[in-house]
Amino acid sequence: MEQIQLSVQFARLDDEARLPTQGSALAAGWDLYALCETIVPKGASTFIATGLAVAIPEGWEGQIRCRSSLGKKGMILPNGVGTIDADYRGELKVLATWIGQGDSFTVSKGERIAQLLFAQVPKVTIVETSYEELGNTERGSGGFGSSGQY
């Protein structure tokens, strides 16, 4: 299978900002680094600055995901995966929430805070139809989860 090559431009908005890095040659994500020390209070969501802006090519998106090592401690991303659209040019910030032990969590300057992955986005056309024209499936209208229970 031929691998797609993608060039993504990053600009440092601060001289101390670190460009994303990969932990290994086959890592799917690019590590993002905290620009400055940030305190995340328990149960609160806080933006962590990276000091970077990015130009994601049209037809692609950036996905900010939690690092498993921080998730294990209790640092989560409240929206699961953060989406960066191709037309966004502001500073990349990571929205983090502390649910671990203690009243707060201190993110150190230069600490790896999240992973950035890139994914293709298809051109989608929404077509309105009747419910009957959607067709039947084995699951049908069975609720949430695999059991269909709410």
Image (cartoon, grey):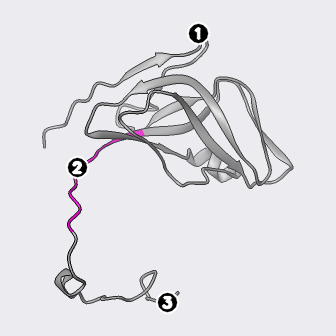
Name the foreground residue: 12 vs 129.
129
Work out how far the residue at label 3 is from the one at label 1, CA to CA, in angstroms.
Answer: 52 Å
Tell me, for residue 15, which label it has, or none.
1
Tell me, for residue 54, which label it has, or none.
none
Residue 23 in sight here:
yes
Residue under the image location 25 percent in, 39 percent down: 59
Image quarter where the N terminus lies is top left
Residue 47 in percent (x, y) is at 66, 38
Look at mark 3 in the image and give the residue it sits on: 149
Residue type, mark 3 in image? Gln
In the displayed orientation, state which residue is furthest to the top.
15
Of the numbered discs 3 and 2, the one sitting upstream in the chain is 2
Badge 2 crowding class, 10 Å Cα cut-off, few under 14, some 14 to 19, many 20 or more, is few
Residue type, mark 2 in image? Pro
In the displayed structure, 122 sits above or below 127; it is above
Name the foreground residue: 23 vs 127.
127
Residue 10 in percent (x, y) is at 42, 20
Q: Which residues are magenta?
A: 117-127
Badge 1 crowding class, 10 Å Cα cut-off, few under 14, some 14 to 19, many 20 or more, is few
Look at mark 2 in the image and give the residue it sits on: 122
